[in-house]
Amino acid sequence: MLAACGLGFSYRAGTPVLRDVSIELAPGSFTAILGVNGCGKSTLLSCLMGLRKPDAGQVLLDGVPMGEVKRRARAQKVALVAQHSHANRLTVYDSVLVGRHPLMQGAPTEADHVVVRETLERLGLSAYSLRYADELSGGEYQKMVLARAFVQQAETLLLDEPTNNLDPANQQEVMREVRREVDERGIAACAVMHDINLAIRYCDRFLFLKDGAVDAAGGRECVTPERIKRIYGMDADIIEHGGRLVVIPR
């Protein structure tokens, strides 16, 4: 389990970006981190991944402080789909195979190749296997990055705005595949998101940040018109349509 307790973080001793933030990512759950731009969402994800060291509090991976977990062991437990990922001249196949590196003892085995091939097939990328990563469209590239995280087979998956710059169909596919990974493997997933309706459809846990502090954490009961107004300054109605909750701005 990945958890954070009382996190505080500031950039260069400036205004606190995170203030006493706690979160627990349980196996089998998909958590959305929600809030306006600049409220600390991506910084929180960086702290959870161990990329930034909090000024206060701590991040625990299976009860062990993240700073005490070696990089390879961390990569075997936690996978990250970053918001900004730069394309390279590797093929799609080789780019995804890189995700197996924390699990390899040497050269890739046939088992590694099987995982990669199956994941590419699952995400509809098999036809692009020999194409260079920097030749992909935005949606194709994002699915390749997701495939690389999936083949890592970590117990926790962290995603920083995974649907950013994707068309509606690709947004749905990416979120659907993450939800499937959570349900089939029983992993924990956590995504920084802006689209509340996508979050409601695919996530079962929600953490709302306001000015770097936790405004609410819990299930769908946290998503209320009053909270939408407080967090985003926007009047909205929440209705049920097709068996799902939908947030409609007024």
Image: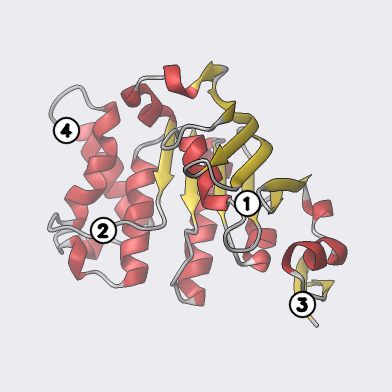
Q: CA distance from mark 1 to mark 2?
A: 24 Å
Q: Residue furthest right?
A: 226
Residue 8 image position (x, y, % from top left):
61, 36
Other-residue count near label 4 (Cα within 10 Å), few / some / many at <14 / 14–19 / ≥20: some
Q: CA distance from mark 2 to mark 4?
A: 24 Å
Q: Quadrant of residue 29?
A: top right
Residue under label 1, please give it: 33
Q: Of marks 2 and 4, which one's residue comes earlier in the chain?
A: 2
Residue under label 2, please give it: 86
Q: Of marks 1 and 2, which one's residue comes earlier in the chain?
A: 1
Q: Are marks 1 and 3 in contact (CB under 8 Å)?
A: no
Judged left or right of residue 219, residue 47 is: left
Residue 145 image position (x, y, % from top left):
34, 54
**What residue is shown at x 15% (from left), y 62% (from top)?**
132
Q: Nearer the viewer, mark 4 or mark 3?
A: 3
Q: Nearer the viewer, mark 1 or mark 3?
A: 1
Amino acid type at mark 4? Pro
Q: What kind of element bears circle 3? A: strand
Residue 144 image position (x, y, % from top left):
31, 57
Residue under label 3, please give it: 248
Q: Of marks 2 and 3, which one's residue comes earlier in the chain?
A: 2
Q: Nearer the viewer, mark 2 or mark 4?
A: 2
Q: Quadrant of the C terminus?
A: bottom right
Q: Quadrant of the N terminus?
A: top right
Q: Of marks 1 and 4, which one's residue comes earlier in the chain?
A: 1
Amino acid type at mark 3? Ile
Q: Quadrant of residue 89?
A: bottom left
Using the image, tell me which numbered label, if any, was put on residue 108. Answer: 4
* Viewer-nearest residue: 198 or 20: 20
Q: CA distance from mark 4 to mark 3?
A: 49 Å
Residue 50 image position (x, y, % from top left):
44, 33
Q: Of marks 4 and 3, which one's residue comes earlier in the chain?
A: 4
